[in-house]
Image (cartoon, rainbow, N blue to C red):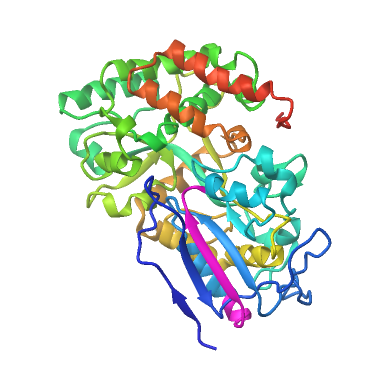
Amino acid sequence: MSQQLHRLDRRTLLRGTLAGAALVSFSGALAACGAPGSDTDKSGGGTKSASNPFGMAKDGTVDAVIFDGGYGYDYVEFAAGVVAKEFPKADLKVSATTKIATELQPRFVGGTPPDLIDNSGADLIGFSSIAAQLEELDDVFEADSYEGVKIEDTLYPNVKVPGTYSDRFVAINYVMTLYGVWYSASLFEENGWTPPKTWDEALDLGAKAKAKKKYLWTWGKEAATYYRTLVIDSAAKEGGDEVRLGLENLEKGIWSHKVIQDILGKLGEMVSKDMFIPGGAGTQFTAAQAKWSNDQQALLYPSGGWIENEMKDATKDGFEMTGIPEFVLSDSSALPYEAVRAAAGEAFIVPSKAKNPAGGKEILRAMLSKEAATNFAKTKLAPTIVKDTIPADGFGSAALKSQSAMLDAAGENTFNFQFYDYYGTNADELVVWNSFLSGDLDVKGLTKAVQGIFDKVADDSSIEKLKVS
């Protein structure tokens, strides 16, 4: 049977102004379960086998909703095409949105959640509120891949960790995400600048930028908390587990810790010295990022490894986008400068109350095939949790090569945070960080506001707490 993809003509980059979800349907292309889901019927109506490990029916429907961010959603379409070869009579519907919580929380409440969700972005659903309503996904890793190899044996180690809550593995984080500070290698070479390793070196670079009528940083309203990420990652490197675990476990007064205050002080000094392109709180974030990647008005930008793909249509020719580890304060930091925050990201979940959890798992199985994972790395310029999919030349990507170099240099010195995704506080913190970066809130005010957000969660007995050690 021929398969036709009906696509709406639209860009797949994250947009703050996106209204509603764009629907993509594979008519007669993908299998799903024909029977409605329930607590006792998870098979999807098909016969389980090595080639159909979840018992997906041959002629059902799968409903997937994907976060339309820096990676777009066409990689899930690609995986759907992989599945369609095995289940040509089935139907897959993939919707893309930037408003995961806004659009999907009512569906959870109403008992009609999608079969597969990419729970990511600024408007993600906090896992504390839905973890108990999700399918455990150990069986996906235990299944054979489309290449006939046990999936778990094809993956990087420890990739279950970020998706495990209360000892239940409920989220497959698909992309190996590395956080760093990004710059134009060609611009730096042209001006004889050295990428900074410490906050003081970054301040010195900011002065050099001003001499060239440029800024050190830029930010956009939806991504102001990228600077929160820079601060807490830097603090974890400088202060070690004392700081990292204090943040993870919502410790009272943790934002007043000397290491965090010293880093905030450096960032506040940059704000006061006008080292940020002004007006970020009123600028859509990809437009703000383009002032760095295309216009080169700013020298540095803190982000995850998705940044190259996110800005591929708004990056100056010859930019040579390159990443470096986040800064340390001193030469006596608990972790070396080379340490990086790196973990699997882009959390894919399968709700237990979905009509077709078997279909959701089958799409995940396809995504974890070498064919689909290689396609993702090549087209999105970022690695997945599937090993051995990136050639030595990084598909010609400077950013992808620099990520590999950072991971190699870090060795065992990698770390991660889970608490923001788990508690879902990003929306509240965006207000605070936009005010701080605009110069309307000082370090003391930011500290009080962010600690207040922490304390509100910590004091709410209805929220099951994440315990990290």
Of residues 238 and 261, which is closer to you in this image?
A: 261
Q: Is residue 272 above or below residue 47?
A: above
Q: Position of residue 453 (x, y in %)?
A: 57, 22
Residue 210, given in percent of the width and then of the height, sits at 19, 24
- Left or right of 391 in this view: 168: right
Front-most of residues 384 and 153: 384
Q: Residue at x 33, y 44 (%)?
A: 286
Residue 415, image x and y in percent?
59, 35
Residue 325 vertical placement versus 442 (above, below): below
Looking at the rendered image, the quarter that the N terminus falls into is: bottom right
Q: Is residue 96 above or below residue 198?
A: below
Mark count: 0
The image quarter containing residue 59 is bottom right
Q: Is residue 391 visible?
A: no
Identify the residue shown where x is 44% and y is 74%. 6
Q: Position of residue 292 (x, y in %)?
A: 27, 39
In the depicted structure, whether residue 216 falls above or below residue 447: below
- The residue range painted magenta reads 84-99
Residue at horizontal 23 percent and vertical 45 percent from the top: 294
